[in-house]
Image (spheres, helix red, strand yellow):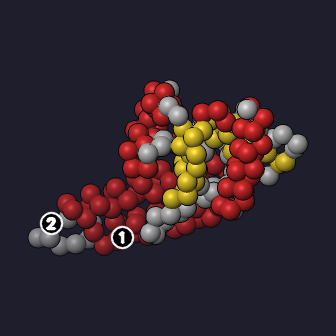
């Protein structure tokens, strides 16, 4: 994490990305072994179609997660930048978005039953933000908008800071810069 007088840069955790790659490669190996050693050697009378489809989908998913982890290791961008302009998010479906301080209406912490904590950022015009994105990212932030009431959410899963620290940094800068605007 880099802190300046007016800018805070929070990097993407390479340790978490390496750990993800190790776990996913292990799961990929187990799934491949199961497919080749167990499923393909089943007797011909046994219908293998369902198991073949499931194993193939798992191999595809684990392969894509491995690529995602490698991209996070190679990625030299900062995960989140907090400065006088707003919050620039470079992770998740909101990647590449700059949320200006003037657009923000409020914040909320969302705590699903068994999952990561999300820091929801409510903005004045979510439809404008959704219209600026394309492809699968657009679908993801639309679903986020439907389920949480805002297209913008942050989690510290991939960041080099913990969740409480992220919330504190954003709240401090929000109070500082919004007070300056008025």
Residue 39 quadrant: bottom left
Q: Residue furthest right?
A: 5
On the picture, is 57 further left or further right than 78? left
Q: Position of residue 41 (x, y in %)?
A: 26, 71
Please, what secondary structure does the residue beneath circle 2 have? loop
On the picture, is 142 further left or further right than 6? left
Q: Nearer the viewer, residue 91 or 98?
A: 98
Q: Nearer the viewer, residue 89 or 69?
A: 89
Q: Which residue is mark 1?
A: 34
Image point 35% across, 66% down: which residue? 36
The Cα–Cα distance between marks 2 and 1, rounded to whole angstroms, is: 16 Å
Image point 71% across, 44% down: which residue? 174
Crowding near pointer 1: few (<14 within 10 Å), some, many (20+)?
some
Q: Position of residue 13 (x, y in %)?
A: 70, 56
Image point 55% across, 61% down: which residue? 117
On the picture, is 109 further left or further right than 7? left
Residue 16 quadrant: bottom right
Please, what secondary structure does the residue beneath circle 1 have? helix
Q: Residue furthest front?
A: 182
Q: Which residue is mark 2?
A: 47
Q: Nearer the viewer, residue 55 or 113?
A: 113
Counting residues from the N terminus, which is met first, the one under dot 2 or under dot 1? 1
Q: Is residue 21 visible?
A: no
Q: Is residue 129 visible?
A: yes
Q: Residue furthest left?
A: 45
Image point 50% across, 31% down: which residue? 125
Q: Position of residue 171 (x, y in %)?
A: 70, 50
Tell me, for residue 156, which label it has, or none. Answer: none
Q: Nearer the viewer, residue 125 or 89?
A: 125
Asked if residue 107 is positioned above or below residue 18 in the image, the reply reads above
Residue 49 quadrant: bottom left
* Location of the C terminus (image quadrant): top right
């Amino acid at each position: 994490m880099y802190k300046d007088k007016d800018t805070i840069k929070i990097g993407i955790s390479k340790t978490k990305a390496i750990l993800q790659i190790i776990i996913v490669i292990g799961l990929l190996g187990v799934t491949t072994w199961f497919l080749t050693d167990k499923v393909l050697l089943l007797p011909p009378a046994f219908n293998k179609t369902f198991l073949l489809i499931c194993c193939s989908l798992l191999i595809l998913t684990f392969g894509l997660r491995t690529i995602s982890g490698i991209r996070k290791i190679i990625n030299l961008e900062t995960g989140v930048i907090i400065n006088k302009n707003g919050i620039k998010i470079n992770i998740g479906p909101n990647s590449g978005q700059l949320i200006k301080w003037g657009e923000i209406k409020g914040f909320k912490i969302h705590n699903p039953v068994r999952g990561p904590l999300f820091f929801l950022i409510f903005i004045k015009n979510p439809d404008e933000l959704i219209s600026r994105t394309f492809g699968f990212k657009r679908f993801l932030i639309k679903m986020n908008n439907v389920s949480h009431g805002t297209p913008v959410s942050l989690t510290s899963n991939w960041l080099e800071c913990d969740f409480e620290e992220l919330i504190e940094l954003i709240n401090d800068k929000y109070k500082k810069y919004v007070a300056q605007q008025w």
